[in-house]
Image (spheres, rainbow, N blue to C red):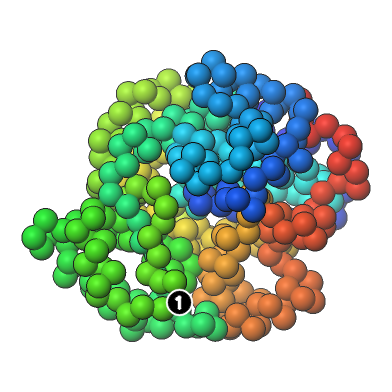
Amino acid sequence: MSATRNSSPVSAARERLLVVCPGRGTYNATEWGMLNRLAGGCDWLKRFDAMRREADMPTLSELDGETPFRRSLHGRGEHASPLIYACAWADLLAIDRERYEIVAVTGNSMGWYIALAVAGALNSEDALHLIGTMGLMMQETLAGGQVIYPWVDESWRPDWTLRQELLALIERIHGSSGAELYLSIELGGMLVFGGNETGLARLAEAVPPRERLPLRLHQHAAFHTPLQEGVRREARRELASLPLHAPEVPMIDGRGHVWTPWSTDSERLWDYTLGEQLVAPYDFTAAIRVGVREFAPDRIVIPGPGATLGGATAQVLVQLGWRGLDSKAAFLALQAQDPALLCMGIPEQRERLVRDTEAMPLGA
């Protein structure tokens, strides 16, 4: 089952959606309980829970309900990643397909794995296996870490000089006295750096402090950098038989490359998913740029949990001048008038997308 299939009659006037799947760090104390609230009792969640029990892990229903939220527990990769996926899956299955059509799917970092399920390149259970396996591998290795720092001003206007200075820091710090520092993610108006402790410490000393920034991301390894080479090797062995196939709708990866239903080579898709994207920078900015330019969506949808990816996505839209946007104020004005970016972690925005009643099942 994919989140793109629809067996009910549809209208030719459906709005076009670009779906942007969330990555790590989006399930926090505020989101605790949302999975059971949205999907408790659903057959697909029962299957997810059964898979977790077979792996001798707490079920997602238990983590989201019976076990009080603890960052030290819920933030671990083997729990956080599947929880985020399940929350996003519940949101995606709730979208009213008589009013909306998903025309393309992308995601941020771990969101690429969710995108595979949404687009139908993996079934939902195989996607859970992929996401849980990768989350556990990352947690057990926990090679390096990530630090985030903005290169736009408070109005989200680009400061290209600052951006170049930040990128130059990588060259200056990396390789000096044992320091390793890399660009990890291009995240809208922010750069995510990955490195070892020495490299991240020197970065923190080199950048001017801003409110709560630079920010070290909790229980994040140096994703999308060469420090994940060991994880890459292990993942390719452990997931050699991962049954990836051509998607049902186009997917945009962390390079801005489009994988289409009619041209995708499943072996190349496997090689990218368990190869390059693990050890090379993930360009979320490019993914959004390609999504809005190539697929002309009416709206951009970010499933839950949370809504933290909304700011980064909006910053890309400002950089592109999409629909005349040139600042944070302009974006907020557009949102107030007719929101083009809908974060399903925000109840009133979610309500615009879902069926009139959610009493109907969310999937078989």
Q: Position of residue 218 (x, y in %)?
A: 42, 52
Left or right, 81 with respect to 324, comes to left
Is residue 258 visible to the viewer in this orientation of the structure?
no
- Determine whether the residue tagged by mark 1 lies in a helix, strand or loop: loop
Vertical side of 184 occupied by 259: above or below: above
Vertical side of 265 occupied by 189: above or below: below
Q: Of the residues shown, which amino acid type is indicated by label 1?
A: Glu
Q: Residue at x 76, y 28 (%)?
A: 42
Q: Residue at x 83, y 32 (%)?
A: 361
Q: In the rendered image, which quarter contains the N terminus?
A: top right
Q: Residue at x 71, y 67 (%)?
A: 340
* Residue nearest the observer in this picture, 32 or 4: 32
As drawn, the residue found furthest toward the left would be: 177
Vertical side of 70 occupied by 51: above or below: above
Q: Position of residue 312 (x, y in %)?
A: 53, 66
Q: Determine which quarter of the picture holds residue 162.
A: bottom left
* Residue nearest the observer in this picture, 211 or 148: 211
Is residue 162 visible to the viewer in this orientation of the structure?
yes
Q: Residue at x 37, y 45 (%)?
A: 277
Query: Which residue bears the numbered disc 1?
Result: 211
Q: Position of residue 316 (x, y in %)?
A: 53, 69
As drawn, the residue found furthest toward the top would be: 54
Q: Position of residue 326 (x, y in %)?
A: 58, 83
Q: Callout 1 environment at 10 Å: few (<14), some (14 to 19), or many (20+)?
A: few
